[in-house]
Amino acid sequence: MNERIKEIRNRIEQTALSCGRQPSDICLVAVSKTVAPEQVKTAAAAGLVVFGENYIQEAMQKIDAIGDSRLTWHFIGHLQSNKAKYVVRYFDLIHSVDSFKLAKEINKQAEKRGKIQKILVQINIGEESTKSGVGADEAVCLVKDISRLENLAVKGLMTLPPFFNQPEKVRPYFKHLALLRNQMRAESIPNIEMTELSMGMTGDFEVAIEEGATLVRIGTAIFGDRS
């Protein structure tokens, strides 16, 4: 695993430098869903500190079992409102906020804990019926609504674009998300920071970095294939 992590980090660094970006501006989120705690500990020993989980029940058990306060946990899966209290308790950043109803519940739970919960707004950039996320046309209105919630801090946007075997075919979707982020920045919405773009996975993260990704979610290239 050490060699795989080293290779991924090198690819991130080379891609960033090739397009005039600083490698330190890109965060590697190791997607550890279905991965045993021992493997996460191995990855942490190799220097990884940010881990992404998709399933709340599994994640809670894993985080408790690992018990390492040096690690940062991101929730990257689809989130239902009734699980908000658990996510607020365990996660530093939630990538997948896609409705005002969900945002309100996260805000309520964060207020109970005296926490400002960092979130990303998930955009269904490919307008796929099988995927979560707010449509690009509705995104600005949603972000403006969320900006009024005092215990939430919107840090940026996330997307899961359509799947293609050729990374270049995904580029227009990444470009669209970056453009949408820039449009929101221009709106100067109070209490909103549009600094993060969560996009790119094992098969296409280099293209995502070229288009402005600050968070790349990589699982298979680190932990191998999972059923």
Image: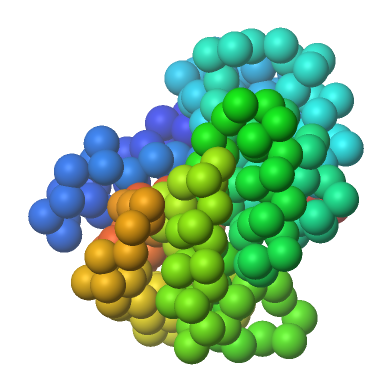
Question: Residue drawn at (56%, 20%), measured in percent from left and top?
Answer: 71
Q: Position of residue 42 (x, y in %)?
A: 63, 18
Count of marks, rendered view: 0
* Vertical placement of residue 10 versus 200, above or below: above
Question: Residue drawn at (27%, 72%), measured in percent from left and top?
Answer: 187
Give the image quarter of residue 53: top right
Question: Residue drawn at (54%, 52%), measured in percent from left and top?
Answer: 149
Q: Is residue 19 left or right of residue 103?
A: left
Residue 222 visible somewhere in the drawing: no
Residue 131 visible somewhere in the drawing: yes
Q: Is residue 109 left or right of residue 10?
A: right
Quadrant of the drawing holding the N terminus: top right
Quick one: 222 or 140, which is closer to the camera? 140
Quick one: 86 or 16, which is closer to the camera? 86
* Vertical placement of residue 168 versus 107, above or below: below
Q: Is residue 36 left or right of residue 27?
A: right
Q: Position of residue 59 (x, y in %)?
A: 78, 34
* Vertical placement of residue 102 versus 4, above or below: below
Question: Residue drawn at (41%, 50%), measured in percent from left and top?
Answer: 155
Give the image quarter of residue 40: top right
Quick one: 152 or 96, which is closer to the camera? 152
Quick one: 222 or 93, which is closer to the camera? 93
